[in-house]
Structure formats: structure tokens, C-alpha cells
């Protein structure tokens, strides 16, 4: 199995799920997940390239583990206020729209490959002058709202 869609199933967590090896795309959007699904780690999801956790109930501080193949991460429409990336992730697309971010998160661990960043519809009041220093490949930035 390469693609798995579990959207809209009233799931509250993803930590009890055992994901098949070789999974490339996982859609957990439109559920009631409240934190990072710890069943998704570098050991359990080595091939995972696309992860959609948008429209869930993820709140507050979100720790994102190192996922060496992840290229697209959708976290929009949650209530995340802080993001901590715990290792290098080769993300090209990061959607953080519609959350409770008040400042641009430290994206040093994903900056080298990031091409699209969406932080629109947040409560961002200031952007650090060095926020985009390492984002050499950034082509699309959505920050309005």
C-alpha cells in the first residue's frame, strides 16, 4: 500500500496505528487528532513523502520528529501556537495556515529545501529579520490574514 486516506473518521489519535512499510502518502485530515501522531516516526514511516494533518484539533506546542523523506506537510486549520522541528526534514511544502501562530516559527531544520510556506490566517505580529535567511529555495510565501 502506497497511499492511505483516513480523513473524516473522527480519529482522536494516530499513535496506535501501525503504518505499512513503503507508505508514501497519508491523509489524516478532518479528524479530531489532538497531537502529533507518534505512530509516525522516522522508523515507522521511512518512505512517507506527503502527510496531511489539516483540519484536526492539534493545539498549542507541536513537536515534529525528523522524517527523512517527508516533502509535504499540511497542518492548516488547527490551533497550533508553536512548532518545534526535532531534526532535519527535506520539506518542500509546509502549510501552517489558519492556526494560532503569533510569530514565524524557527524553520532552520526545513529551510534548506522549503519552496512553499503558507502561514496565512494566523496572528503573526512580527517576523524576525533572519527568518528567511536559510530559505534559499523559497518561491511561494503566503502570510496574509
Image (spheres, grey):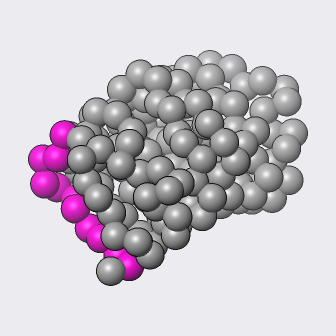
* Secondary structure character of the magenta stretch overall: loop
Residue 132: horizontal and vertical position, in percent? 80, 39
Q: Is residue 11 magenta?
A: yes
Q: Identify the residue at horizontal 44%, vertical 75% (top origin).
A: 22
Residue 49: horizontal and vertical position, in percent? 52, 67
Residue 140: horizontal and vertical position, in percent? 68, 56
Closest to the observer, 109 or 128:
109
Q: Is residue 24 magenta?
A: no
Quadrant housing residue 34: top left
Q: Residue furthest front?
A: 43
Closest to the observer, 6 or 144:
6
Quadrant of the snapshot with the N terminus: bottom left
**Highlighted magenta segment, given as a residue range:** 2-12
Quadrant housing residue 92: bottom right
Q: Is residue 13 visible?
A: yes
Q: Identify the residue at horizontal 60%, vertical 47% (top origin).
A: 66
Amino acid at each position: 500500500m502506497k497511499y492511505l486516506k483516513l480523513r473524516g473518521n473522527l480519529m482522536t489519535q494516530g499513535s496506535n496505528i501501525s503504518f505499512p512499510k513503503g507508505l508514501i502518502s497519508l491523509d489524516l485530515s478532518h479528524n479530531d487528532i489532538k497531537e502529533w501522531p507518534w505512530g509516525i516516526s522516522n522508523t515507522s514511516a521511512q518512505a512517507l513523502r506527503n502527510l496531511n494533518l489539516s483540519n484536526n484539533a492539534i493545539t498549542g506546542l507541536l513537536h515534529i520528529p525528523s522524517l527523512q523523506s517527508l516533502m509535504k506537510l499540511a497542518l492548516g486549520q488547527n490551533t497550533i501556537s508553536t512548532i518545534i522541528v526535532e531534526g532535519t526534514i527535506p520539506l518542500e511544502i509546509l502549510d501552517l495556515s489558519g492556526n494560532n501562530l503569533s510569530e514565524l516559527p524557527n524553520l532552520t531544520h526545513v529551510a534548506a529545501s522549503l519552496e512553499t510556506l503558507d502561514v496565512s490566517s494566523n496572528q503573526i505580529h512580527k517576523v524576525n529579520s533572519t527568518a528567511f535567511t536559510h530559505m534559499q529555495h523559497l518561491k511561494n510565501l503566503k502570510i496574509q490574514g
